[in-house]
Image (cartoon, rainbow, N blue to C red):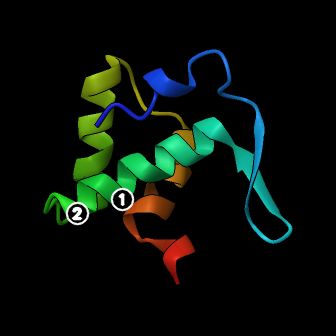
Amino acid sequence: MDFFTPIKGHEYNGVEIKPKLFTTKLGIALMNWGKANYEMGITNVDDAYSIFSEYKGRKINEREREYIRMGFDRELDK
């Protein structure tokens, strides 16, 4: 579930994810993290936040929380 190493040094490069909808590679990595947690059977987004926080060794920030939730809820798949 390491979506972050491949983008190292390019985290803030812009990417169009849907027509006229842009984000950063870091945003995509965070959404992929949330989606991967859902697909692995995590049933609660708060558990995904806790796993991410433990993985990073620090408290999760609001930006991370929002992108992980978007991935977990599969908002862009709809």
Quick check: 36 above or below 9? below
What residue sits 57% from the left and 47% below the top? Answer: 28
> Badge 1: how crowded within 10 Å, few (<14), some, or many (20+)?
many
The x and y percentages for residue 71 are 45, 60
What residue sits 35% from the left and 21% below the top? Answer: 56
Helix, strand or loop at label 2? It is helix
Task: Residue type at mark 2: give it.
Answer: Glu
- Give the residue at the far right of this rendering: 20
In this image, 63 relative to 68: left or right? right
Residue at the spot of label 2: 39
In this image, 24 relative to 37: left or right? right
- Give the residue at the far front of this rendering: 6
The x and y percentages for residue 17 are 69, 61
Task: Residue type at mark 1: give it.
Answer: Lys
Q: Are marks 2 and 1 in contact (CB under 8 Å)?
A: yes
What residue sits 54% from the left and 53% below the top? Answer: 66
Helix, strand or loop at label 1? It is helix
Q: Where does the N terminus fall, quadrant-wise? A: top left
In this image, 77 relative to 63: left or right? left
Give the image quarter of residue 49.
Answer: top left
Quick check: 21 above or below 57? below
Q: CA distance from mark 2 to mark 1?
A: 6 Å
What residue sits 31% from the left and 16% below the top? Answer: 57
Residue at the spot of label 1: 35
Quick check: 51 above or below 8? below
